Amino acid sequence: MKIAVVGLGYVGLVSGVGLAAHGHEVVGVDVLPEKAAAVARGEVPFHEPGLPELLVENLAAGRFRVTTDLSEAMAGAHVSMIAVGTPSGPDGIDLSYVSQAAEAIGRVLGAAAPGHVVCVKSTVVPGSTDGPVAQALARGAGRTGAAGLAMNPEFLREGTAVADFLAPDRIVVGADSSAACDTVAALYAGFSAPLLRTSLRDAEAIKYATNAMLALMVSYSNELAGILEATPGTDVDVVMDGLHLDRRLTALGSAPRRTAELATYLRAGMGFGGSCLPKDVEALRAHGQTVGAPTPMLDAVLAVNRARPGQVLRLLDEALGGLAGRELAVLGLAFKAGTDDVRASSGLAATNALVAAGARVRVHDPLVGPGRVDLPAGVVHATSAEAALAGADGVLIATAWPEYRDLDWAAAAASMRRPLVLDGRNALRRHAWPEAVTYIPIGRAPAASAQEGT
């Protein structure tokens, strides 16, 4: 089948290249000529393991190509897939980019194959596809019902998106007719995952239900960690180990017993970030308010997440006897390891809070180099972790990069003015620390955690 993918951001590029890898003819469309040209050369505008190689392979095979001309992409296309951004905030989701794409598709529908389906891949709240998107499509086409409508949510995790697309745990297709559903389902004929056929609105809601649940699990874990940080003699990792042994969190049919992957969201840290969880919980919360449904649980999830970086920094404040005037290092700016995405990053939030408290801060991240992110005035963006640590009174590990686990901590500690390590991700709990290092994990009362050697 021929597919036009509108939008070559994270979702559009991964989905387009993934469908091309399954033998479809895919044309990616982007309004930014420089982005389109870069992708056509095989350059991925963001970090995603495995995607550059897959892009180059499918460009060379002729299964994937790029254009800025939507009418060219739509010529003979069976499906047009809208994968543009849907920013959101406390006032709700912004559908302007999706509506613009739908209206533009409507204007060139005459070039498409008979039975063409317009499929929304962007994350939109229930009622968007059969509401504003359908209206925009009708404006462009000059009539309603000009094409079938479908909603096909993505479940991609940054850092593992290629594997998530090529070997999904589920495929959800919502549509306004059985014919439209059949057309989109045919895109995934070579996939082995279960395919769920739903209404448009159920498909939209499934995406939000998934991300809201994951965010809830993270905030629950972090609220529990905060309680245990004030309770001597407790350890959040031990408590979570016990929780993970619950048979309801164990992969069914596994031998030996194996904790389900879902349980990885039940671990303490500094909060969730990135492009999906914060945005989607905010959007679902705003949608609830719009339809008159209270959202106390979503409100709490967001409140816990906003408060968590400051809660972790209090451990550093107490250990140092104050933050003002201290030389501090923050290791990790990406919201999680394996990506260069700094959106809603707790490392950035912590950096801002440290500066506001009067500390002098140096930062480092393996993928987020100098000039890649806006930092508060006075913050030094070190080119190496060692440079960030030299002369520091303490360090916060904000992202669980393997590079920080493998650092020569004996040498790093010797270069620090005060070798104090606050592990905001508990990523180095099992590390053999030099005797001189004061290591503070999260989820334990400070008096019990200081000077932990293993």
Image (cartoon, rainbow, N blue to C red):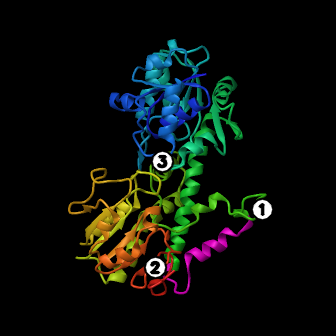
**Residue on which the image places disc 1:** 255
Number of the label disc, if any, that sits on residue 337: none
Q: Position of residue 433 (x, y in %)?
A: 46, 79
Q: Is residue 260 left or right of residue 165?
A: right
**Residue on which the image places disc 3:** 283
- In depth, the one of 93 and 55 nearer the eye is 55
- Residue type highlighted by circle 1: Ala
**Residue on which the image places disc 2:** 433
> In the displayed structure, would residue 13 be above or below residue 311?
above
Q: Is residue 92 left or right of residue 22?
A: left
Q: Is residue 206 left or right of residue 48?
A: right
State how many labels appear: 3
State the extent of the magenta-drawn residues as a range.
229-247
Q: Position of residue 69 (x, y in %)?
A: 41, 20
- Residue type highlighted by circle 3: Ala
Distance, label 1 to label 2, CA atoms, is 34 Å
- In depth, the one of 16 and 52 nearer the eye is 52
Disc 1 to disc 2: CB gap under 8 Å: no
Q: Nearer the viewer, mark 1 or mark 2?
A: 2
